[in-house]
Structure formats: structure tokens, C-alpha cells
Amino acid sequence: MAWVLVGIGGALGSITRFILGKLISKRFNATFPIGTFIINITGAFLLGFVNSLDVTRSTYLFFADGFLGAYTTFSTFMYEGFNLFEKDKKMNAFVYILCSLFLGIIFYILGFDMGKFGMKH
Amino acid sequence: MKKYIFIGIGGSLGAVLRFVIKAIQIGAYKNMPVNTLLINAVGSFMLAFTLTVALEICELDAHVHLGITTGFLGAFTTFSTLCKETVELMRHGFYNVALFYPAISAVLGFAAAYSGVYLARKVGPGVIKKRRADILGENE
């Protein structure tokens, strides 16, 4: 049963990533991987938020392991970092990777704190 | 429309595989989430390889390629879990590992992507040549 929840969440997460990624890239400058960046950071934020709440195991499996796990991506992140590096934008690549990781962690904490704040009030 | 089905199926498989692998107890190395690290590294390699093949070597059917890369591998690897695990390490006071873990993920992930692209470029053209030769009967 667990894998059904993870699977469905996963399907929705990847489709959302695809659609949102395309929308964001079209809207902004396409050379910097802004799509994946926003997706990963918002995903980290939401995961922090969910982790602060008292949700059922099923909800967590579906939304955290399933949806958010699939919504965010590490492989695309690395490939895009490599692309920047190869196009002689080595500094951009380094900044992109560093900022993503740093902000991802910060936003996870922010999401978590927001959830805790919301729970108390 | 078909795109979404391929991405969705790939995504569900990727998510489930990640979930299954994460559940395996390897006996974490110094509290480091080795499972996620391996998943992200392997996934990065495969994505870089597949995308390079699709973009530079030979045309893959668009739906299949989306299903494998955006779908399966995109869902298989995860960024949010990495952030969560790093913060948890910090919460438990393992500050050194908390610094090391995302760093090694990035290093291995980048090396994996680099290797994937490199391997595709190295091996790809040779495979295409052989395929053409077979089709044209040159190998008889």
C-alpha cells in the first residue's frame, strides 16, 4: 500500500515539475536554470513545512516521499550545473550549485519553523 | 497529453524505487545518509548520459526520453530529502557530517554528470557507426 501512495505522489510530482519548469523557463532568461532552482527551493520549503506537522503516515508517504521527492530533483540540478560549467560559465556553475544547496537548507528550516508557528497558533 | 502519461509513469517508478532503496538499512556511514547519496549520484550519471545521447548522439523518441529523464530519473533523485537530512544532522549535533554530506553529494553528483556526458560522447558515435554498418550489411 505504501508504494501506491508514493507512486501516485511521484507521478504528480514529476508532472508538476515538468509543467512548472517549462513555464518558469519561458517566463525568464533561459540560460540560467531558474526553473529547477525555484522548484528545488520551493520543494525544500514544503518538505520542511510537512515535517513540522503531525500528519498521518499515509499523508507523509504521498506528499513527502511521493510528491516532493519527485517534484525536486538532484540529477537535473547536476546536469544543468555541468552545462553551465561546460559553456565556460564555471563561476556560474559553482554559484548555482552552492546557492541551491545553501538556500535549499535555509528554506527547509524556514518551512519547518512556519509549520511549527502555525501549529502553535 | 501522451507526454504527461510517460512522465507520470516514469515518475511513479522513480519515486517508488527511491523509497525502496531508502528503506534498506546499510548501516549508515558515520550517520551519513548513504542511500540518498548513492541514489543521487547514480541518477545524475544516468540522466547526464541519457540526455547527452538524446541531444548529441541519436534521436530518442521524445516521449520515451521524457519518461526516462524528466520522469524516472527526475523523481528517483531528490533535492528536498537532501536538505532535510542535512538539517536533521545539524539538529542532532553532527555538524561536521552536516557540512560534509551536501558537499560530497555535490562533488559526486557533478562527477557523475560529467562522467555520464563524457561516456555518452565516447561510446555513442561508435555504436551509431556499428549500427549503420550492420544495417548496410558491411559486417557480413
Image: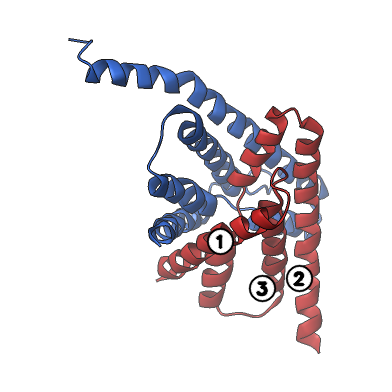
Chain colours: A red, B blue
Q: Which residue is mark 3?
A: A50
* Residue under the point 51% across and 37% down: B51
Residue identified by numbered label 2: A112
Image quarter of the N terminus of chain B = bottom left
* Protein chain holding label 1: A
Quadrant of the drawing holding the C terminus of chain B: top left
Is there CB contact under 8 Å for labels 2 and 1? no
Task: Tell me the SS state at disc 2.
Answer: helix
**Mark 3 closeness class: few <14, some 14–19, many ≥20 residues within 10 Å:** many
- Give me the residue at 69% from left, 58% from top: A27
Between disc 3 and disc 1, the foreground one is: 1
Residue density around tag 1, few if under 14, some if 14–19, many if 20 or more, within 10 Å: few
Taking B125 as reference, is B133 left or right?
left
Q: In terms of depth relative to the viewer, which is nearer, A62 or A57?
A: A62
Chain holding disc 3 = A
Please tell me in which quadrant of the rendered image residue B4 appears.
bottom left
Residue type indicated by callout 3 = Val
Instruction: For mark 1, give the secondary structure.
Output: helix
User: Which label sits on residue A19?
Assistant: 1
**Above or below: residue A1 compared with residue A76:** below
